[in-house]
Amino acid sequence: MNAKILDGKQLAQTMREEMKQEIADFQKQHNLTPGLAVVLVGEDPASASYVSGKRKACAHVGIYSREENHPASMSEDDLLKLVEELNQDPKIHGILVQLPLPDHIDEKKVLYAIDPAKDVDGFHPFNVGQMMIGEDTFLPCTPHGIQQMLMRNGIETASKHVVIVGRSNLVGRPLANIMLQKNTNANATVTVCHSRTKDIGHYTRQADIVVAAIGRPNTITADMVSDGAVVIDVGVTRVDDATKKNGYRLSGDVDFEAVSQKASAITPVPGGVGPLTITMLLHNTIKAARKSIQ
Ligand SMILES: NC(=O)c1ccc[n+]([C@@H]2O[C@H](COP(=O)([O-])OP(=O)(O)OC[C@H]3O[C@@H](n4cnc5c(N)ncnc54)[C@H](OP(=O)(O)O)[C@@H]3O)[C@@H](O)[C@H]2O)c1
């Protein structure tokens, strides 16, 4: 079998065009522009590049964005003050603090200081709880993007067995919650594997949908996937590659060449899940702006 390539770049473009229209209508109706603040502390090049991607995506769809770039020496107190200022700013509907933060700053303290009504990353425990009990809330962007990827490609999840490898608070756990919900585009039977799972292949071979969110290239090999399964590769790892100008390439968690011969559909890396993550951040910012006037 030659797998259908689930093109995240194309889907993200389609969704962003839809959002452009949605924002224009929203502005006309309410005389309000959705606003996102992105806070970057330190000079990590990967984080800086994510932040710049978010700024460009906001500009493209018509979201007002405020970038707060601060040196790695910024104190935790000053960062908490900034978060509080953004919590109070009526032009800002969503706040995103780019992770990781420097070691001297307690990440949890900062994330929990964000007003849950502006928590467009969906990391605040209030929103995590809301998600878990199936309330309408901000879903974390990467797992929400995966759900959109499946739904918009006509891949049914109801009554399917979804096996997720990885149990982080960022991807694996929230995705398990989302897929478990009693609603359309979910209703799956979910298994979650992690580094202490014995014989991961035993579980992934039973899956209709395999999601790899591990961060280790080529962990999911062809013998671990059944014929016709759908394979979602969340992993993004920089691997040295002398043939590339920048000296590296991005690798997913799945042995793409071999697995794509067996799967019915598969996401590439890059160009799969990644572009949808930022798209769902835009979605959450629009949602926050809508909630602010309700
Ligand atoms: N494309 C995107 O938008 C996007 C967004 C987020 C993350 N990512 C990528 O997705 C990957 C995972 O991210 P994350 O934040 O979830 O990472 P993480 O916090 O490091 O979690 C990795 C998970 O994988 C498990 N694991 C590690 N080695 C394993 C192994 N050999 N077998 C089975 N499970 C193993 C870990 O198990 P334990 O819990 O037992 O340690 C953990 O649950 C990374 O490559 C990251 O860059 C991509």
Image (tube, helix red, strand yellow):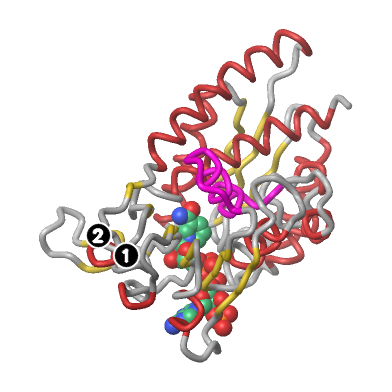
Type of residue at label 1?
Answer: Arg
Residue located beneath label 1 in the image: 238
Extreme-top residue of the structure: 28
**Residue drawn at point x = 42 percent, y = 61 percent:** 229
Residue at mark 2 to residue at mark 1: CA–CA distance: 6 Å
Cβ atoms under marks 2 and 1 closer than 8 Å: yes
Position of residue 233 in the picture relative to residue 251 (left or right):
right
The quadrant holding residue 105 is bottom right
Q: Which residues are magenta?
A: 139-157
Residue 87: x and y in percent read: 80, 42
Find out if the beta carbon at label 2 lies less than 8 Å from the nearest ligand 1 atom. no
Q: Looking at the rendering, in which quadrant would you find the C terminus?
A: top right
Judged left or right of residue 228, residue 143 is right
Q: Residue at x 46, y 48 (%)?
A: 50
Determine which residue is flagged by label 2: 249
The residue at the point 37 percent across, 73 percent down is: 220
Judged left or right of residue 43, residue 292 is right
Neighbor class of circle 1 (other Cα within 10 Å; few <14, some 14-19, many 20+) is some
Q: Secondary structure at mark 1?
A: strand
